[in-house]
Image: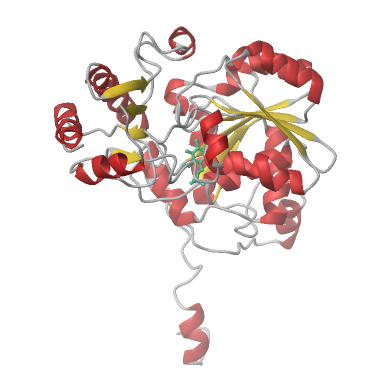
Amino acid sequence: MAKYKSIFTRAVHGGERGAKPDFKPVSTPIYNSVGYLYEDLKDLDDVFGNERPGYVYSRYGSPTNAALEEVLADLEEGEAALTFGSGMAAVYAALMAAGVKAGASLLSAFDVYGATYAICARLLPDWGVKTKFVEATDLRAVEKALAELKPAAIILETISNPLMKVADIPAITKLAHRAGAKVILDNTFATPVLFQPLKYGVDFCVHSTTKYIGGHGDVLGGAIVSSKANRNILHEIIKMTGGNLGPAEAWLTLRGIKTLPLRMRQHCTNAMEVAKWLQGHPQISKVNYPGLADHPQHEMAMKLFPEGLFGGMISFEIESAGKKEIFRFMESLDLILPATTLGDVYSLTLYPAMSSHRALTPEERKKGGISDGLVRLSVGIEEVGEIIGDLEQALKKI
Ligand SMILES: Cc1ncc(COP(=O)(O)O)c(C=O)c1O
């Protein structure tokens, strides 16, 4: 017999919280519940007080997100991880956790994702943070800037967006720590398959999980892998400011991550072939890919990454091309999609001056080497001959 007489009450509570499972699901379910119950309120009190692990409210954590955080920390060989609603939410939380606040200063690599650049160039200075940009591949310049600025943190990318520069992360981390600065490294382009920053002492390893980690272009998200102590700082921040990854998104990302090493291998193999082909094409004046022997940081990439793996991202310049010619080229592509993202199974192309680096002024783009003829290509996992065939037919149209 039903516990409650009213159909109103029974409709609300029926079927809920009755099961006492004696089984374990093979894969983690999506826990949509916002609140969590304990037999004894003392347990809830202890979870609130961080005296025991558990869940109280989904802004504080959820079992689905916890499963994703566990595998991310494991792949990056870090102690802990925290997930966010987007890569930018993760970048911003890392800056806060690293002590970037009014009166402090921040050093950033010049060659970073446009929104990261905009946070450093425009948002933070308005809030009383002194920011400076540096060429991260110039160790002397980094050392000088650290000494002059005494920043709370330095932020940079393992493989930079969009010029694919590879800075000496182990050396920069040592210099930064010596100068009392925390290191925030965006490892989105490299993924833990190519590089595990925590091994070198990086404090906050940031990911836009929207990219390779999710891998299928269907889920926005971000993550930070760090020490347990830094995770605690980040957790206090997310508890106050939100920006959480939803459990359904955590589940999709967890699903995507299972094939990350397989996908990365194919991305890297394909990208190497495409980069070599582009380099030999008469209409292409420059190819930026760390796997090419003439890339300025090819040696560094060989030192940091596993043999033969240089990532799936390429950028290249089409000879004498401006916005009109690049639009024509991108519109002529058939297999390669002109979508504003990267790291998906699909091959994708993007015009940095229009999208990822639109937040920069034309002068800032010029200074950073992002020309009006530069195209970014995220090489997918399709058959490589068909990717090259598509590039070839589209180049003929301009
Ligand atoms: C290197 C890098 N970091 C961070 C981001 C921001 O990630 P999201 O779009 O998930 O906020 C991007 C987005 O393109 C990126 O390329």
User: Quadrant of the image for the C terminus?
Assistant: top left
Q: Is residue 236 above or below residue 133?
A: below
Question: What residue do we see at 42% from left, 24% from top?
Answer: 193
Q: In the rendering, at what x and y percent does residue 65 appear? A: 52, 48
Question: In this figure, what is the number of numbered marks?
Answer: 0
Left/right of residue 93 with respect to residue 356 in the rendered view = right
State how the image is colored.
secondary structure
Of 318 and 263, nearer the camera is 318
Extreme residue in the front direction: 320
Q: Is residue 128 above or below residue 311?
A: below
Q: In the rendering, at what x and y percent does residue 320 appear? A: 32, 29
Question: What residue do we see at 36% from left, 42% from top?
Answer: 323
Left/right of residue 166 with respect to residue 394 in the rendered view = right
User: Quadrant of the image for the N terminus?
Assistant: bottom left
Q: Is residue 266 visible?
A: yes
- The quarter holding residue 152 reads top right
Left/right of residue 383 with respect to residue 37 in the rendered view = left
Extreme residue in the bottom direction: 6
Question: What residue do we see at 45% from left, 31% from top?
Answer: 162
Q: Is residue 50 visible?
A: no
Q: In the rendering, at what x and y percent does residue 33 appear? A: 53, 63
Q: In the rendering, at what x and y percent does residue 143 appear? A: 72, 14
Of 93 and 145, nearer the camera is 145
